[in-house]
């Protein structure tokens, strides 16, 4: 009788030990999985941040390009202004300018007529128009 009880007790103890070991192993596996998941999440976050940085940089570059284009356009327009009224175009034709000079497009007849007459704005007597050049200060 004594031996059987001892054997049963030993078997129960072994079972308990095995169960405890299995529990420990499961817990360790769970912890490892958690760590792996955390590492993966961190990697994903880093990648997302990199992508966002790239996007921001690209957007900024595009903005710069657009600004450059705008500046170039403005400069071109400014340069064009001086050339587009040639002397023979600017001469009076029966008291009014030819319609097709680039500078005078979109103006009314009276605004066109003002060119080459006396007084203020436009060509002719007094302080004339014209917005660029050395003698600009005298025109004011």
Image (tube, grey):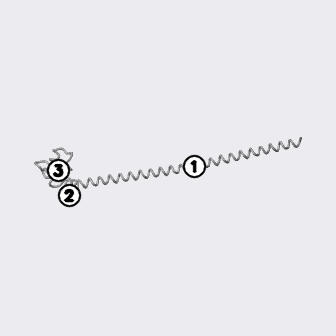
Q: Residue furthest right?
A: 1
Q: Which of marks 3 and 2 is nearer the N terminus?
A: 3
Q: Nearer the viewer, mark 1 or mark 3?
A: 1
| Residue assigned mark 1 | 40
Q: In this view, does 13 lie to the left or right of 79?
A: right
Q: Is residue 48 left or right of residue 64?
A: right
- Asked whether the beta carbons under mark 3 and mark 2 sit within 8 Å of each other, the answer is no
Instruction: Measuring from the top left, give residue 55's x and y in whole percent.
Output: 45, 50
Q: Which of marks 2 and 1 is in front?
A: 1
Q: Residue at x 79, y 45 (%)?
A: 14
Q: Which residue is drawn at 26% across and 54% down?
A: 78
Whether residue 125 is visible here, answered yes or no, is no
For the residues marked 1 and 3, what is the alpha-carbon distance in whole angstroms? 73 Å
| Residue assigned mark 2 | 135
Assess disc 3: are there few (<14), some (14-19) or many (≥20) residues with their C-alpha within 10 Å of its C-alpha.
some
Quick one: SS at disc 1? helix
Quick one: SS at disc 3? loop
Q: Where, by quadrant of the figure, is residue 106 drawn? A: top left
Q: Which of marks 2 and 1 is nearer the N terminus?
A: 1
Instruction: Measuring from the top left, give residue 110's x and y in whole percent.
Output: 16, 44
Residue 122 numbered mark, or none: 3
Instruction: Measuring from the top left, give residue 102's x and y in whole percent.
Output: 21, 50
- Could you say which is closer to the camera, residue 117 or residue 135? 117
């Amino acid at each position: 009788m004594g031996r059987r009880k001892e054997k049963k007790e030993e078997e129960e103890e072994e079972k308990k030990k095995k169960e405890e070991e299995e529990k420990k192993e499961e817990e360790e596996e769970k912890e490892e999985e958690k760590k792996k998941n955390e590492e993966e999440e961190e990697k994903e976050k880093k990648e997302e941040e990199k992508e966002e940085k790239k996007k921001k940089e690209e957007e900024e570059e595009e903005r710069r390009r657009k600004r450059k284009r705008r500046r170039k356009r403005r400069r071109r327009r400014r340069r064009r202004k001086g050339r587009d009224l040639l002397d023979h175009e600017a001469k009076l034709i029966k008291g009014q300018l030819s319609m097709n000079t680039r500078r005078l497009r979109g103006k009314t007849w009276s605004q066109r007529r003002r060119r080459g007459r006396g007084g203020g704005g436009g060509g002719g007597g007094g302080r004339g128009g014209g917005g660029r050049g050395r003698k600009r200060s005298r025109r004011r």
